[in-house]
Image (cartoon, grey):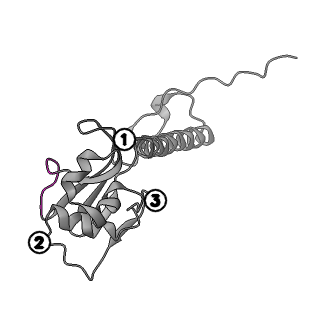
Amino acid sequence: EASEHASFYDSSKPWGELTEIGVLNYFKGSPFYSTRSNNEKLRVNEGPEALKKMMGAEYVVDTALSSPPQLWVIRYQWRADASQVSLLKLFYMIHGVVYASPTPLLLVESRLSKASHHLHRAFDSTRRAFDLARRAGADDAEELPPVSNGNGMGFLPPPLLPLLPPPAR
């Protein structure tokens, strides 16, 4: 199975004038396509309307989310019966390049990583300001130089706390 970070583009196939069926045929060439899907079983036997009569994994173009010809959204879903489906994965095709939509876990990991990076920069900047102030002999916030948060906005660090002696043993 292809990674969420992978993409697919087939330069030998024109993508600009694709229809729903053409999009699924183009998608079939991608590493995201599963040959065990109901779509593959039907390619030999029947048309796309027969998908609704089958139970199992299938690919369908989401016409409500698609904006042809630039954007196509493909749903990979599990069909339990004619009216009940559960979304397994989303794919999207922009200007002929197919991408897997990131999972909620990847989105959360990305946001946490970004927040962690900014917190680390802020703590590092504050630590450097305190180190500079200690070397200069400052003992309160009024004597500390302004510190930049990296976005061009300056701020004053909090007042220095007196250093407490280590606890007695």
Q: Secondary structure at mark 2?
A: loop
The numbered dot on residue 3 is: 3
- Mark 1 vs mark 3, foreground winner is 3
Q: Which residue is mark 2?
A: 17
Secondary structure of the magenta portion, mostly? Answer: loop
Tell me the crowding category of disc 3: few under 14, some 14 to 19, or many 20 or more residues within 10 angstroms, Cα based: few
Q: Which residue is mark 1?
A: 154
* Res 104 quadrant in image: top left
Q: Mark 1 and mark 2: span between their CA atoms?
A: 53 Å
* Nearer to me, 168 or 10: 10
- Amino acid type at circle 2 is Glu
- Mark 1 vs mark 2, foreground winner is 2
- Point 37% across, 66% down: residue: 7
- Amino acid type at circle 3 is Ser
Q: Position of residue 123 (x, y in %)?
A: 52, 39
Hey, which residue is sitting farthest front in the picture? 45
Tell me the crowding category of disc 2: few under 14, some 14 to 19, or many 20 or more residues within 10 angstroms, Cα based: few
Specify whether residue 28 is in view.
Answer: yes
Specify whether residue 94 is in view.
Answer: no
**Magenta-highlighted residues:** 63-68
Q: Secondary structure at mark 1?
A: strand
- Point 48% across, 28% down: residue: 158
Asked if the stretch drawn in magenta spans residue 65, the answer is yes
Q: Earlier in the sequence, mark 1 or mark 3?
A: 3
